[in-house]
Image (cartoon, helix red, strand yellow):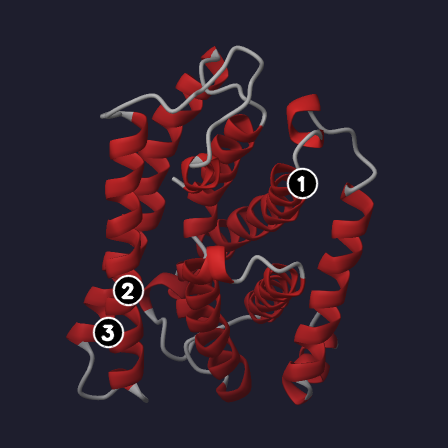
């Protein structure tokens, strides 16, 4: 691993592209797996299922990886400006490659207009992660930021259960509680910790203004998502499930995005 690090640091752009291609290969392999009948019958649901399948692989991999980096190297949490290891640098390369791949999938399949919020999120993440890879600063911060992927596992599971029409199942109800817990612990807490760190050390951090603005934008987004999550799962205003055969009305895409 130590021998690989100089290569990655010398060519961060190509390294990200290689990781992006690997996630594209994973996308193609996952298409061979069976999907629920309700998903298979609808083109949008099928695309969303396949897209989420790759996202799930990324979240399972990088969420566990980020936690491991902090447990093994605690300085990752306290020195997000300049500390990093070979594994943490590789983690950021891998994750950046995923976000590039996912943005490409959204755009090339014609879902950019309906997924503009995800594209904005991906753009902010990719710009920040590429800055970390090229300057070798804030790599630890990127690792800590990937704690949110622990919550992404339950978020993806939630949407996949919705796609399969299983939102009334016991699994969905268990997952929505787990999702609420991980959202608070791994997403909200992580974002606010990073915001606190940047604010508290703003005077000496490199390009602190850019990262502060980025974090504020991300905080606004996750608070809006949190409100939508609470409204959809815990304070539903109305049921938009339309029929006994598992079909939904014209608002189904909005339903599946909340």
* Mark 3 / mark 1, whichever is N-terminal: 1
**Which residue corresponds to mark 2?**
194
Q: Residues within 10 Å of mark 3 (few under 14, many from 20)?
A: many
The residue where tag 1 is placed is 43
- Left or right side of 77 for 235: left
Q: Residue at x 71, y 67 (%)?
A: 19
Callout 1–callout 2 Cβ contact below 8 Å:
no
Name the element at disc 2: helix
Q: Residue furthest front?
A: 250
The correct choice, above or below, for 183 with respect to 21 in the image is above
Residue 3 lies, in percent from the top left, at 74, 77
Q: Are marks 3 and 1 in contact (CB under 8 Å)?
A: no
Q: Are marks 3 and 2 in contact (CB under 8 Å)?
A: yes
Query: How far is mark 1 from mark 2, CA to CA?
Result: 39 Å
Identified at 82% across, 46% down, the residue is 29
* Label 3 – label 2 distance at C-alpha: 6 Å
Q: What's the mark number on residue 198? A: 3
The one nearer the camera, 33 or 153, is 33
Secondary structure at numbered mark 1 = helix
Tell me where residue 63 appears, x and y as whole percent. 51, 49
Observer-side mark, 1 or 2, equals 1
> Residue 178 vs residue 48: left or right?
left
């Amino acid at each position: 691993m130590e021998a690989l690090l100089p290569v990655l640091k010398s060519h961060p752009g190509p390294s990200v592209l290689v990781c992006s291609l690997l996630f594209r290969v994973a996308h193609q392999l996952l298409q061979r797996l069976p999907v629920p009948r309700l998903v298979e019958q609808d083109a949008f649901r099928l695309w969303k299922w396949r897209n989420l399948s790759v996202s799930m692989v990324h979240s399972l991999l990088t969420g566990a990886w980020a936690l491991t980096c902090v447990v093994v190297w605690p300085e990752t949490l306290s020195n997000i400006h300049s500390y990093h290891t070979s594994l943490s640098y590789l983690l950021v390369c891998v994750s950046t490659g995923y976000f590039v791949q996912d943005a490409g999938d959204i755009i090339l399949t014609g879902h950019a207009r309906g997924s503009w919020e995800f594209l904005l999120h991906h753009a902010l993440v990719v710009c920040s992660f590429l800055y970390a890879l090229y300057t070798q600063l804030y790599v630890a911060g990127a690792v800590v930021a990937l704690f949110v992927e622990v919550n992404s596992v339950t978020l993806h599971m939630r949407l996949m259960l919705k796609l399969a029409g299983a939102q009334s199942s016991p699994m969905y109800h268990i997952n929505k509680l787990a999702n609420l817990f991980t959202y608070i612990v791994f997403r909200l807490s992580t974002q606010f910790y990073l915001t606190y760190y940047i604010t508290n050390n703003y005077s000496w951090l490199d390009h602190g203004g850019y990262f502060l603005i980025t974090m504020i934008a991300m905080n606004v987004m996750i608070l809006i998502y949190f409100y939508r999550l609470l409204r959809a799962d815990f304070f539903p205003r109305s049921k938009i499930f339309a029929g006994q055969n598992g079909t939904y009305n014209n608002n189904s895409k909005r339903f599946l995005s909340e």
